[in-house]
Image (cartoon, rainbow, N blue to C red):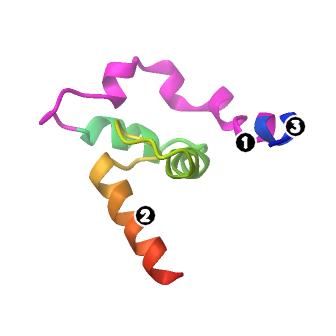
C-alpha cells in the first residue's frame, strides 16, 4: 500500500474520540460492559473508518467502530455471505 494511501487511511485516528479515553475503556476485562465505549464510538465522526480498519486488519479484541468482537465477527460473516 502506498504511503499516501496508508496516511489517508489512518487520518480518522487524529480526531477520534477514543484518543481522549484510555485503552482500558475500549479493551475491558472479559465479561465487563462495553456500553460506555460504544456510546462514545457512536458520537465519533471517525466511527465508520475505525470499524472498516478493524474489519480489514482483523482486530479481534476490544471495541472498534462501536462494535464488540462478537458483533464484528457477525458482520464479517454476513458480509462474506453476500459475496
Q: Secondary structure at mark 2?
A: helix
Q: Residue at x 87, y 37 (%)?
A: 4
Q: Which residue is mark 2?
A: 76
Give the Cα distance between marks 2 and 3: 27 Å
Q: x, y percentage for residue 72?
A: 38, 55
Q: Secondary structure at mark 3?
A: helix
Q: Which circle's residue, 2 or 1, is located before the other in the chain? A: 1
At label 1, counting other C-alpha atoms closer than 10 Å, the crowd grade (few under 14, some 14-19, many 20 or more) is some
- Residue 44 located left or right of residue 11: left
Q: Secondary structure at mark 1?
A: helix
Q: Which residues are magenta?
A: 7-33
Q: x, y percentage for residue 79?
A: 47, 72
Q: Residue at x 54, y 44 (%)?
A: 57
Q: Residue at x 40, y 17 (%)?
A: 22
Q: Quadrant of the C terminus?
A: bottom right
Q: Check if residue 39 falls in the magenta segment.
A: no
Q: Quadrant of residue 3?
A: top right
Q: Which residue is mark 1?
A: 9
Q: x, y percentage for residue 49?
A: 61, 48
Amino acid at each position: 500500500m502506498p504511503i499516501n494511501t496508508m496516511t489517508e487511511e489512518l487520518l480518522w485516528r487524529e480526531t477520534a474520540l477514543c484518543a481522549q479515553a484510555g485503552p482500558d475503556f475500549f479493551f475491558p476485562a472479559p465479561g465487563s460492559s462495553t456500553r460506555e465505549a460504544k456510546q462514545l464510538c457512536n458520537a465519533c465522526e471517525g466511527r465508520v473508518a475505525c470499524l472498516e480498519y478493524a474489519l480489514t486488519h482483523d482486530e479481534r479484541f476490544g471495541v472498534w467502530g462501536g462494535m464488540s468482537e462478537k458483533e464484528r465477527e457477525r458482520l464479517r460473516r454476513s458480509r462474506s455471505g453476500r459475496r
